[in-house]
Image (spheres, rainbow, N blue to C red):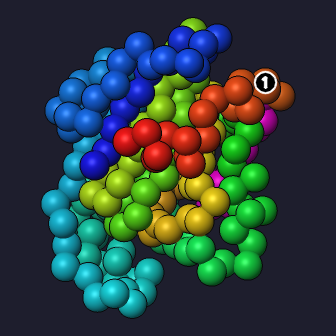
């Protein structure tokens, strides 16, 4: 089940808010300027290819492209067997921002988005059928866990894809990691 925790950015000992209610997650995030929604499930084969995944969600992807000016969409998958899983995890664990919206739709699996908004950190556990859109310039980081298992549709306005500007802030190292939060759930 998806969840949202909101912490003070200087105290990760206890969340100010915790909810697993999808409508409440959406409301809280929308109030903070973050798009969060649940899409309908599509039947996909276990070994679905990126092209078949994009075809299954073509209507939704095209709508997002039209609304937001995205020019490309792709599919990224990571499994515990991936030889570079540790490197990929480390790459996303530092606070950064982008010059374009970061949009992810979880086709399967899960991951944690940490959104540093003013003096709060919103920790969003995204799971299958969740769409999150992090506006450009938003400080954030992503934790896929030590044994990543997810497939996401990504949308971009920049044909180069994922380009981060790291903030240098150490806040991500102070926040609870994927393993800790998943055990608590």
Please report the residue visible at 47 percent of the width from the left and 32 percent of the height from the top.
123
Q: Describe the element under mark 1 as helix, strand or loop.
A: loop
> Residue at coordinates 55% horizontally, 41% vertically from top-left?
180
Q: Nearer the viewer, residue 133 or 119?
A: 119
Q: Residue at x 31, y 60 (%)?
A: 128
Q: Kindly report the secondary structure that dominates the magenta region of the rendered protein.
A: loop
- Left or right placement of residue 164 versus residue 78 in this view: right
State the residue lying farthest toward the right.
168
Where on the picture, by quarter, is residue 9? Answer: top right
Quarter of image, res 164: top right
> In this figure, which residue is indicated by the disc labeled 1?
169
Q: Nearer the viewer, residue 20 or 93?
A: 20
Residue 45 falls within the magenta-colored stretch: no
Q: Which residues are magenta?
A: 157-167
Which quadrant is the C terminus positioned in?
top left
Does 64 sit left or right of 180 as displayed?
A: left
167 lies left or right of 144: right
Residue 157 x, y percent position in the rendering: 54, 52
User: Residue 134, can we see it?
Assistant: no
* Residue 17 image point, x, y percent: 36, 18
Residue 90 position, x and y percent, is: 75, 52
Give the image location of residue 131, x and y in percent: 34, 49
């Amino acid at each position: 089940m998806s969840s949202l925790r909101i912490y003070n950015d200087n105290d990760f000992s206890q969340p100010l808010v915790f909810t697993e209610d999808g409508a409440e997650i959406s409301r809280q995030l929308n109030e903070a300027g973050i798009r969060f929604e649940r899409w309908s499930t599509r039947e996909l084969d276990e070994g679905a290819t990126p092209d078949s995944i994009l075809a299954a969600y073509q209507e939704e992807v095209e709508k997002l492209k039209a609304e937001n000016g995205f020019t490309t969409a792709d599919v990224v998958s990571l499994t515990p067997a991936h030889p570079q899983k540790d490197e990929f995890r480390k790459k996303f664990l530092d606070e950064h921002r982008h010059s374009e919206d970061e949009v992810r739709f979880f086709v399967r699996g899960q991951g944690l988005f940490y959104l540093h908004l003013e003096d709060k950190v919103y920790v969003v556990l995204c799971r299958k059928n969740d769409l999150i859109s992090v506006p450009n310039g938003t400080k954030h980081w992503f934790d896929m866990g030590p044994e990543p298992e997810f497939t996401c549709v990504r949308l971009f306005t920049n044909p180069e894809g994922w380009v981060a500007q790291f903030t240098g802030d150490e806040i991500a190292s102070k926040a609870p990691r994927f393993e800790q939060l998943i055990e608590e759930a």
